[in-house]
Image (cartoon, helix red, strand yellow):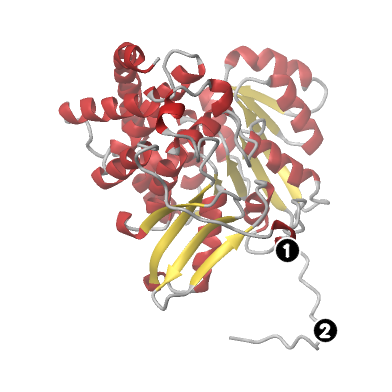
Amino acid sequence: MQVVNPHVRAERRPVEAVRTVTVLGATGSVGMSTVDLLKRGNGRYAVEAVTAHKNGAQLAQIARDLNARFAVVADPAAYDDLKAALAGSGIQAGCGESALVEAAQRPADWVMAAVSGSVGLKPTLAAAKRGATVALANKECMVCAGAMFMRTAAASGASVLPVDSEHNAIFQALSAGPREDVSRIFITASGGPFRTWTREAMRAATVEQALKHPNWSMGPKITIDSATMMNKCLELIEAHHLFAAPPSQLAVLVHPQSIIHGMVEYRDGSVVAQLGSPDMRTPIAHCLAYPMRIDGPSAKLDLAKLGQLTFEAPDPERFPSLALGQRAMETGGAAPTILNAANEVAVAAFLNRKIGFGGIPALVEAALDAAERRNATAEPQDIDEALAVDHMTRSLANELLPEIAAKSV
C-alpha cells in the first residue's frame, strides 16, 4: 500500500466526468435530500429522469429545477397536473407503472431507488438489469426479493450502493478488511420514542406519541417502524442479502444518540465504526459520488460537545418485533415478504386508529403463523411471485385485523 507523505503537496484530483442521474421517488424524504445534493452539484450531475407517486406539481418543479429530461407520476390521476405544470419546458411527462420502469431503464449512470413500498420493486430491478449503479433506499427489494435482486445485479454487472444510514455505514466499515475476516456486523438503533417506556405504557401509546422520533425526521411509516423497532428487523434482512452475511453474524445494538450508524467487528478484535450526524444527506452524498467524496452540507460532528456515546442491548420483551424479524430471516423464503406486507397493513391500521400500538406486532405474528399453516413461505422466483405473496399477505392481514383490533384497542 502506498503511504502518502503529508509534507508533499498532493496532486490535483482528476476532473470528474459528468454523472447522469435518475431519481425514483424524488418527492419523498430520501428523494428530496438527493435533490438538495444535486442542486449543489455545480454541474457535476445531469438528471435524466425524476419520478413521484402523485404530487405532479411538486415533481414538475423538481424536474424544472434539475433540468430533467423525463418526469413520471405513478398515479395516472396526477398526470394532467404534471403535464400542465411542465408545459413549454421541453420535459417529457409520463404516468403509470410502465412509465416508472421506462424512467429506470433510461441511460443514467446512477439511479436513486427511493420509491417506497412494493411499487418500487419493478423499476429498481429494471435499473439493476441494465447494469446501472443503483443507490438502494427501497427496503422491499431486499426484504421481498433480496436473493433474486442480488443475483440479477451480479449477472448484469450492476453496482448496488446501500443508502440507508446503517447499511451505508456497514458498507464503509467493510472496506477495512477482507470479508472472510469479519466476525460480527452491528446495526445500531436509536430505540425510537419508546426506548425507556414500560410495556404497559407502550400498549397505550397514541399515534402522536409514536410519531415523535427523538433524532430523525422521517415519513410516518418509517417513524412508526422505528417506534416498534420493526425497522431494525427489515434492516437485518437487508444486511443479510446485501453483505451475504449469515443471520448469526448480525446483531442490533441500541445507541440513543444516532451518531454511530453501523459497526463491523473483525476476527482480530478490531471494531470499525462509521460516525456522522443524523442527516440522510451524508450516506446519500457517499453513494452519489462513490468512489470519490464530495463536500456535504450535513452538520459536522463535534464529539467534545456531544460528550458521550452510550449503548444498550435491545429489549425483546418490550419490542417483540425483533423476534419476528429474526424468525422471518431464519425461515427465509417468502417469510420476509410476509413480514413486510403484514407490517405495512398493521402500521396503516395504527395510523388510522383501527388498532392499538401493541396490535402492530400482534398482527404481523398472526399473519406469519397463518401463512406458515398454508405452506405459503416458498421463496419467490421472480418479481411477479414476490408481488403475489405480498398481495396474498395483505388480504390475509386485513382478514385478521378485526380480531387483533378487538384485543389491542
Percent from the top left, x then y, of residue 14?
76, 70
Classify mark 1: helix, strand or loop. helix
Q: Position of residue 197 (x, y in %)?
A: 48, 35
Label 2 crowd (10 A; few <14 / some 14-19 / many >=20): few
Quarter occupied by the N terminus: bottom right
At label 1, which amino acid type do we have?
A: Ala
> Compared with residue 346, is residue 69 higher up or lower down, i.e. above or below?
below
Q: Position of residue 3 (x, y in %)?
A: 65, 87
Name the residue at 51% across, 35% down. 194
Locate the C terminus and report the quarter of the image it occupies: top left
Give the spatial CA distance, label 2 vs label 1.
Answer: 30 Å
Q: Which residue is mark 1?
A: 304
- Looking at the image, is 102 positioned above or below residue 206? below
Q: Residue at x 65, y 56 (%)?
A: 276
Q: Is any atom of residue 133 visible in this view?
A: no
Badge number at residue 65: none
Image position of 342 with respect to 190: above or below: above
Q: Which residue is mark 2?
A: 9
Task: For mark 2, give the secondary structure.
Answer: loop
Vertically, is 26 above or below 39? above
Front position in the image: 347 or 390: 347
Q: Quadrant of residue 32?
A: top right
Looking at the rendered structure, the number of numbered marks drawn on it comes to 2
Residue 156 horizontal/vertical position (percent): 45, 53
Of 310 and 338, which appears nearest the observer? 310
Q: Identify the residue at horizontal 74%, vertical 36% (top origin).
A: 68
The three-letter code of the residue at mark 2 reads Arg
Instruction: Residue 184: tell me if it is visible.
Output: yes
Residue drawn at x 71%, y 15% as measured from the top left: 81
Where, by quadrant of the figure, is residue 57 drawn? top right
Q: Is residue 217 left or right of residue 331?
A: right
The answer to whether 205 appears left or right of 240 in the picture is right
